[in-house]
């Protein structure tokens, strides 16, 4: 029997509560061009459909991936006019616990949605 370390880490993200109305979903997406399966967990606020979200679409969602090394998480955000990974001093931030990664993702979503409401 093989052990799916990345799968276990992604499942741990799903165990962390998100606010009412928010959705967290695990995705496994195969890219035939790259011959690679991308695996992550998305967190989206009410009214945002991750499967149809494109640049120019109002709103935002976060995605959390397991780093290539397999022991930490990285957080990214897709929003109306921007997509980014959470960074500090120009380096992608790596989170060691699922709870910290989800908390960061929710904070980033809150900030991005607030910027959109303010028109920044």
Image: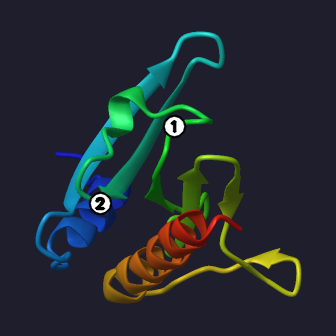
How much space separates mark 1 and mark 2, taking CA atoms?
13 Å
In the figure, is residue 39 to the left or right of 10? right
Asked whether 65 or 83 is in front, the reply is: 83
In the figure, is residue 86 to the left or right of 2? right
Q: Position of residue 57 (x, y in %)?
A: 51, 37
Q: Determine whether 28 is above or below 117 in the image.
A: above
Residue carrying label 2: 45
In the figure, is residue 16 to the left or right of 64? left
Q: Position of residue 61 (x, y in %)?
A: 43, 55
User: Residue 16 appears in which quarter of the rendering?
Assistant: bottom left
Asked whether 53 or 97 is in front, the reply is: 53
As helix, strand or loop, the secondary structure at mark 2 comes to: loop
Residue carrying label 1: 57
Q: Are marks 1 and 2 in contact (CB under 8 Å)?
A: no
In the figure, is residue 56 to the left or right of 66? right
Most distant residue in the right direction: 90
The residue that appears at 39% across and 77% down in the rendered structure is 106
The residue that appears at 32% across and 46% down in the rendered structure is 48
The residue that appears at 64% across and 11% down in the rendered structure is 33
Q: Determine whether 33 is above or below 81 in the image.
A: above
Q: Position of residue 85 (x, y in %)?
A: 67, 64
Q: Quadrant of the C terminus?
A: bottom right
Q: Determine whether 35 is above or below 77 in the image.
A: above
In the rendered structure, which disc, 1 or 2, sits on the residue that comes first in sequence? 2
| In this rendering, the label closer to the viewer, 1 or 2 | 1
């Amino acid at each position: 029997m093989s052990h799916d370390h990345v799968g276990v880490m992604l499942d741990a993200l799903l165990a962390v509560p998100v606010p009412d109305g928010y959705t967290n979903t695990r995705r496994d997406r195969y890219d035939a061009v790259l011959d690679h399966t991308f695996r992550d967990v998305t967190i989206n606020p009410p009214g945002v459909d991750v499967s149809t979200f494109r640049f120019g679409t109002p709103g935002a969602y976060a995605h959390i991936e397991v780093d290539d090394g397999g022991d930490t998480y990285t957080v990214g955000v897709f929003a109306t006019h921007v997509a980014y990974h959470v960074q500090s001093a120009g380096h992608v931030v790596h989170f060691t616990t699922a709870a910290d990664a989800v908390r960061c993702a929710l904070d980033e979503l809150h900030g991005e949605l607030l910027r959109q409401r303010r028109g920044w």
